[in-house]
Amino acid sequence: MTSFSQRYGYREGSPALQIEGISRGLRNRIVNQIWGLFLASDRDREGYVARILDGFLKQPLPLPMSPSTAWQTSKNIRDQLLSENTPWWAIYDLVEFLYDNSLPLRQSLASRINKVLEEELAGYRLIEGQIQMVSSPEETAEIHAAMAAESVPDPVKEHLDRALELLAPSQRDYRNSIKESINAVEAIVCKIVGENGTLGSLLKQLKEKVDIHPALEAGFSKIYGWTSDANGIRHAMEEEATVGPEDARYMLVSCSAFINYLATKAEKAGLLP
């Protein structure tokens, strides 16, 4: 289980979606891709070093530019990128710059960078040469709000914490992350209703306790059905690849938002502290 400092972003290693910054691991991995594609290879190293120094970093070129000076300069560039003194957003700026200035390697760059961004749960992707947001700060805020709210019971937070852990690069267990997200909703509904049971049956009782719109009840009932039927998340799947990180992120955000909604409703009704 992740620690408090990791879950709430006070220490490196949080598996939460990365929007307003990048972790040390994500910085390292992006720089590794840049190093491997443009700086470590003998293929036009001098040309890429010159482009990065002149066009991006706006720094003087080493004179003379020779294979030995290009190699040393490439290592200096790598050290600069890895340094915390280089703002996190500059790393993304450089990715866009290299995409614009490396036509032969564009496809490889996009493929490698997007793989890293997905595995490290970054809220961005390299799309048509631009780093574009795919997860909004509002979505991330829903997860943090559910984890921090005093009115949300601890068992609910434990399921959400586990769902986050299973999204992390070291785990990537998307099926079980989705299951934990649904279990979190099930746990808060059990608390509000005052008895144990499955989410499918308890949702019918929930509307007797709190004022919940029929569309929301129906929506989560269908989502629960998807996770519970013979071909669903809680049962064996013949094709594991049918569940991806986008599915797990969507469920985590949606379930966190629903939990925040129910906790507020239940708190107003005096059903939660």
Image: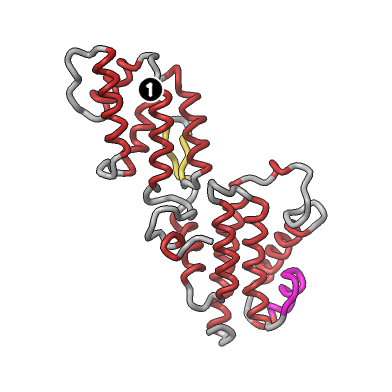
Give the residue at x 59% y 58%: 163
Q: Magenta: predominant secondary structure element?
A: helix
Q: Is residue 182 above or below residue 60?
A: below
Q: How many marks?
A: 1
Q: Is residue 230 above or below residue 265?
A: above
| In the foreground, 265 or 9 | 9
Tell me the crowding category of disc 1: few under 14, some 14 to 19, or many 20 or more residues within 10 angstroms, Cα based.
some
Residue sitting farthest toward the right: 230
Q: Position of residue 117 (x, y in %)?
A: 48, 41
Q: Quadrant of the N terminus?
A: bottom right
| In the foreground, 231 or 41 | 41
Q: Magenta stretch: give its range.
A: 196-207
Q: Is 98 within the magenta? A: no
Q: Quadrant of residue 58?
A: top left
Helix, strand or loop at mark 1: loop
Colouring:
secondary structure
| In the foreground, 16 or 102 | 16
Residue type pointed to by label 1: Ala
Residue sitting farthest toward the bottom: 270
Residue that badge 1 annotates: 40
Q: Quadrant of residue 235?
A: bottom right
Instruction: Give left or right: position of 177 versus 49.
Output: right
Instruction: Give left or right: position of 179 versus 48.
Output: right
Q: Position of residue 134 (x, y in %)?
A: 49, 45
Give the residue at x 27% y 41%: 86
| In the foreground, 170 or 19 | 170
Q: Is 197 within the magenta? A: yes
Q: Is residue 267 above or below residue 79?
A: below
Give the residue at x 44% y 55%: 137
Q: Position of residue 243 (x, y in %)?
A: 67, 46
Give the residue at x 54% y 50%: 168
